[in-house]
Image (tube, rainbow, N blue to C red):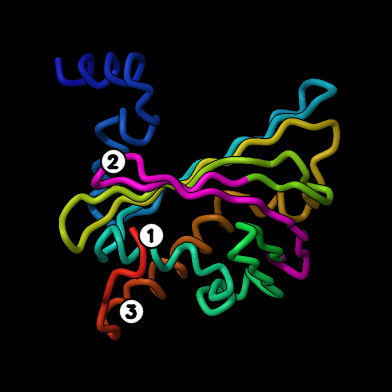
């Protein structure tokens, strides 16, 4: 009966798969980071879909504040470099990669207050080989010092410039590694910082 309820909720409330499946969401509650990356190249126009989710042991507003400090991303992981953030224009340039391959991304973004306990950062790549890649990052309060963070990305194009070597290793493996390093950095920063709210 519980499984049927979860399935109905996922259909009518558009709950993501990782939350709709009890066994998957249980893993998240136990501290695992879930990453799904799929590249459909069966048609002329390829379709890349990426999603991930996990829990973060910080307040939601702290995570929201820190995740928008794009200039600090290289401190979180070596998978980010050469960030140039134009906060007033809601735009940043970043290079993201692994194993000597780095994609150059020019990104426009917009923050939204979905509710008292949820924030969303919508973003879109506006220039370069990944132009058209878009998605959003959501952060939701679960408890005072426990947040649920999820990422969605989508791109449809005839050419998606991801090297075969990276595809063989697995986008999911690389994505999970990046997420783990970011979580570790954010949780450590929170424990060593006198947290105050800059913006909600």
Q: Quadrant of residue 143?
A: bottom left
Task: Report helix, strand or loop for mark 2.
Answer: strand
Rendered position, 92 above or below 155:
below
Which span of residues is magenta-colored? Answer: 95-123
Q: Position of residue 188 (x, y in %)?
A: 33, 79
Quarter of the figure that contains the C terminus: bottom left
Residue 121 in magenta stretch: yes
Q: Position of residue 117 (x, y in %)?
A: 24, 47
Q: Which residue is mark 1?
A: 64
Left-right relation of 137 to 145: right
Q: Residues within 10 Å of mark 3 (few under 14, many from 20)?
A: few
Q: Which residue is mark 3?
A: 188
Q: Which residue is mark 2?
A: 115
Give the spatial CA distance, label 3 vs label 1: 15 Å
Give the spatial CA distance, label 2 vs label 3: 27 Å
Q: Nearer the viewer, residue 182 or 28?
A: 182
Q: Position of residue 96 (x, y in %)?
A: 68, 63
Dots 2, 3 in contact, CB < 8 A: no
Q: Residues within 10 Å of mark 1 (few under 14, many from 20)?
A: many
- Residue at image location 73% in from the left, 57% down from the top: 105
State which mark lies toward you, 2 or 1.
2
Q: Nearer the viewer, residue 120 or 129?
A: 120
- Residue at image location 27% in from the left, 55% down from the top: 147
């Amino acid at each position: 009966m519980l499984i049927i309820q979860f399935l109905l909720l996922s259909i009518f409330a558009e709950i993501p798969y990782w939350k709709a499946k009890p066994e998957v969401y249980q893993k998240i509650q136990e501290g695992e980071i879930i990453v799904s990356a799929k590249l459909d190249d069966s048609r002329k126009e390829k379709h890349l879909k990426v999603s991930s989710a996990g829990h973060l042991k910080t307040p939601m507003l702290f995570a929201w504040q820190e995740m928008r400090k794009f200039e600090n991303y290289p401190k979180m992981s070596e998978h980010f470099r050469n960030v140039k953030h134009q906060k007033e224009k809601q735009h940043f340039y970043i290079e993201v990669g692994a194993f000597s391959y780095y994609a150059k991304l020019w990104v426009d973004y917009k923050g939204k207050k979905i509710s008292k306990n949820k924030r969303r950062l919508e973003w879109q790549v506006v220039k370069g080989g990944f132009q058209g890649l878009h998605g959003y990052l959501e952060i939701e309060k679960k408890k005072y010092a426990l947040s649920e963070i999820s990422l969605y990305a989508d791109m449809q194009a005839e050419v998606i410039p991801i090297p075969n070597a990276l595809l063989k290793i697995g986008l999911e493996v690389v994505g999970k590694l990046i997420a783990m390093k970011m979580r570790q950095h954010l949780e450590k920063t929170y424990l060593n910082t006198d947290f105050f709210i800059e913006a909600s």
